[in-house]
Image (cartoon, rainbow, N blue to C red):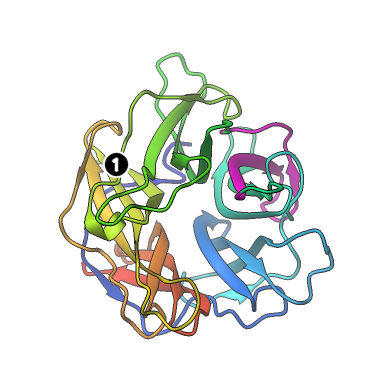
């Protein structure tokens, strides 16, 4: 079970080559407005990608975003699957949802953790981590309650890992973005306390936040936000994390005024992390001229790795792009 998601035999490393074509283009009736936050897992005889979408043909007027899916036999050519996997709604996720993370369960079902957002009257949007269950990975039902939520904190972009357990019972650790609520803008030359935390659970539903910060916001290129961890357990020992960092960029002509990049960190125990100095995926390509963000990594059959990420160009158009490991 622990080797089925967020687990790799070897470290994918920090050197990546951008692929020439987007994996998912924002050109469908359900995703032409927004195509964001990829999560890819091996499923059946190929790979399934879950991602956030929003488009003109959605039939629920109360929803501003939902989770879609696409399937690929080789993690290169993707075919969008019809319909919405799960829509916004329910406690903690009234208005829209994104950042899905799907893991298999011991009973053969799947659980999706995702970020839910609720618009607050006279206040900023509130975010929390919620979940859903599925028998087949296509049809999902929301689970009651909130997995991570607190009045003074906004949580999002979860990644859940199976951990070894001496007792034989399931054990899980969630990594998630956390920021004070209401959120403040960074001061000139400063930060706004966006960081990555972790929480433990024995049943995958009730999580207790672990003390301290896993990855702090302490670099200039992360000054607007540090978030969206992708965490891999490594058979050779330790953990590799990829995460997004954004910085204000008022010169961008369209869309949100930020540059986004993907960074990495390493930990021996999953708790104490050391940031790598290099940028893994820099903005500036054809699809990601403005931003590269929300990474997700899977292994390929030839021994290499592929990172999927959301990409934004200078026109403010989002797509799912990818990059392949150098070795």
Residue lying furthest left in this view? 277
Q: Residue at x 57, y 52 (%)?
A: 100
Q: Is residue 149 above or below residue 85?
A: above
Which image quadrant for residue 45?
Answer: bottom right
Report the front residue among 136 and 161.
161
Q: In which quadrant of the rendered image does the C terminus lie?
A: bottom left
Give percent across and percent down for residue 58. Answer: 79, 70
Is residue 11 visible in this depiction of the protein?
Answer: no
Q: Residue at x 66, y 64 (%)?
A: 68
The residue wearing badge 1 is 216
Which image quadrant for residue 138?
Answer: bottom right
Q: Residue at x 26, y 53 (%)?
A: 264
Q: Is residue 142 a member of the stretch shown in magenta?
A: yes
Is residue 45 visible in this depiction of the protein?
Answer: yes
Give percent across and percent down for residue 122. Answer: 68, 48
Q: Residues within 10 Å of mark 1 (few under 14, many from 20)?
A: some
SS for callout 1: loop
State left or right for residue 122 relative to residue 237: right
Give percent across and percent down for residue 44. Answer: 58, 57
Give percent across and percent down for residue 233. Answer: 33, 41
Report the front residue among 86 and 54.
54
Residue lying furthest top in this view? 167
Report the front residue among 107 and 274.
274
The magenta region covers 124-148
Q: Is residue 107 a member of the stretch shown in magenta?
A: no
Q: Residue at x 41, y 41 (%)?
A: 3
Report the front residue among 241 and 285.
285
């Amino acid at each position: 079970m622990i080797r089925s998601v967020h687990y790799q035999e070897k470290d994918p490393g920090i050197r990546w080559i951008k692929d020439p074509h987007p994996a998912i283009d924002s050109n469908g009736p359900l995703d032409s407005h927004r195509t964001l936050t990829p999560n890819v897992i091996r499923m059946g005889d190929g790979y399934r990608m879950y991602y956030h979408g929003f488009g003109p043909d959605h039939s629920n007027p109360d929803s501003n975003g939902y989770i879609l899916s696409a399937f690929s036999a080789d993690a290169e050519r993707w075919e969008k699957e019809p319909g919405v996997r799960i829509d916004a709604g329910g406690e903690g996720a009234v208005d829209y949802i994104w950042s899905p993370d799907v893991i298999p369960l011991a009973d053969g079902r799947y659980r999706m953790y995702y970020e839910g957002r609720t618009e607050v009257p006279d206040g900023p949007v509130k975010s929390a981590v919620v979940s859903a269950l599925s028998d087949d990975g296509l049809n999902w039902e929301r689970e009651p309650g909130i997995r991570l939520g607190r009045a003074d904190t906004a949580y999002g972009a979860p990644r859940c890992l199976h951990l070894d357990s001496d007792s034989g019972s399931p054990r899980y650790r969630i990594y998630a973005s956390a920021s004070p609520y209401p959120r403040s803008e960074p001061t000139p030359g400063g930060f706004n306390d966006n960081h990555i935390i972790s929480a433990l659970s024995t049943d995958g539903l009730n999580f207790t936040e672990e003390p301290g910060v896993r990855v702090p916001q302490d670099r200039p290129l992360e000054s607007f936000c540090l978030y969206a961890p992708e965490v891999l357990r490594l058979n050779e020992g330790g953990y590799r994390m990829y995460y997004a960092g954004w910085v204000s960029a008022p010169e961008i002509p369209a869309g949100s005024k930020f540059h986004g990049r993907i960074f990495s960190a390493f930990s021996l125990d999953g708790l104490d992390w050391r940031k790598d100095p290099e940028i893994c995926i820099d903005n500036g390509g054809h699809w990601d001229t403005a931003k590269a963000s929300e990474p997700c990594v899977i292994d390929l059959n030839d021994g290499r790795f592929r990172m999927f990420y959301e990409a934004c160009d200078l026109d403010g158009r989002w797509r799912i792009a990818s990059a392949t490991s150098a070795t």
